[in-house]
Image (spheres, grey):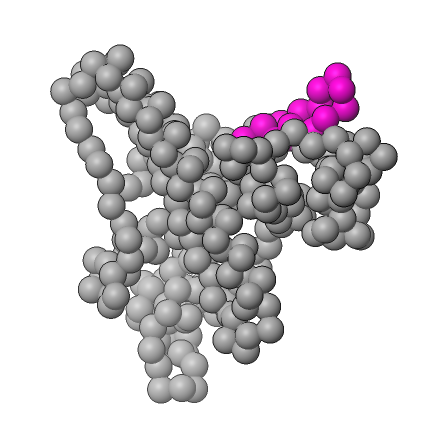
Amino acid sequence: MLRPLARLLMAHGIHFPAFSELAKGVFVDVAARDFPDDGSGLSDSRVCLLSGVHRREVKRLRAEAPQYQAPQSVSMGAQIAARWCAEAAYLDHQRRPKPLPRTFSQGGEVCFERLVESVSKDIRPRAVLDEWLRLGVATLDEADFVHLAEAAFVPVNGVEEKAFFFGKNLHDHLAAATHNLLDGKPAFLERCVYYDGLSEASVEELRVLSRELAVAALQEINRQAMTLQQRDVDHDGADQRMTFGVYFYDESMRNGGGRPQ
């Protein structure tokens, strides 16, 4: 479970002492937040016992607990891309996000400017487009049409943005598996298909099929989720979140090397 993470951290110059310090803070936070108490809050001594972290360190780490927030480009960009992938006006006959004229004067109501303004009027559409071009999320053709580079918000060049999605996706996948291992009811969907003894050509065929089916499933879930979110906007109990994800991975059985998808 930790090998891919260790590889990633070392590739970015994050060595074990830094990871150990971060892990201590996480153990303290989980002990304080996720284990039941008598309603008065867990004492530092109880957190020390649960986490195995020294009591002096527990006090310091509880006082320094960090707050994690999505980069602004992620929170805004993901909403815009989700709408582009969900609303019928922005889809082609195959229900895929179609290229959009950049400005209202070029395309009327169905254009990139109106798409951005439908999410927020506090930021200029041109600023969003420039950032998306930098990140590789969108391209601009010679006719001044904006193309979504992927059928979801997947930054190509933005390290901070990619790191945010990396953490979010792995957290929710591992949280679902942990819930199931601890016999949580009802169990979460957490399944995969795995085969060995395949040729490279067969793996490539399965890779293409997996991507096609995954994109179709993600787009359909996105469309339905947006419809339900709009329906629930005035609902008192609309305080839930969900994640649905898929992945594909292959590696050689001879040398243990791998290449994630």
In the displayed structure, would residue 4 be above or below residue 17? above
Of residues 105 and 74, the one nearer the viewer is 105
Instruction: Write down the quadrant of residue 216 in the picture.
Output: top left
Q: Residue at x 47, y 61 (%)?
A: 241
Q: Quadrant of the N terminus?
A: top left
Q: Position of residue 259 (x, y in %)?
A: 35, 23
Residue 136: in magenta span: yes
Q: Position of residue 91 (x, y in %)?
A: 58, 37
Of residues 166 and 233, the one nearer the viewer is 233
Q: Position of residue 21 (x, y in %)?
A: 45, 51
Q: Please give left or right for residue 112 compared with residue 94 in the image.
A: right
Of residues 171 and 209, the one nearer the viewer is 209
Q: Residue at x 28, y 24 (%)?
A: 206
Residue 75: in magenta span: no
Q: Please give left or right for residue 246 compared with residue 223 in the image.
A: left
Instruction: Write down the quadrant of residue 49 in the picture.
Output: bottom left
Q: Please give left or right for residue 89 compared with residue 170 in the image.
A: right
In the displayed structure, would residue 190 be above or below residue 248? below
Q: Residue at x 27, y 49 (%)?
A: 190
Looking at this rendering, what residue extends furthest in the front direction?
A: 93
Tell me the magenta residue range.
Answer: 134-151
In the displayed structure, would residue 153 be above or below residue 174? above
Looking at this rendering, what residue extends furthest in the right direction?
A: 105
Instruction: Write down the quadrant of residue 19 in the picture.
Output: top left
Q: Quadrant of the C terminus?
A: top left
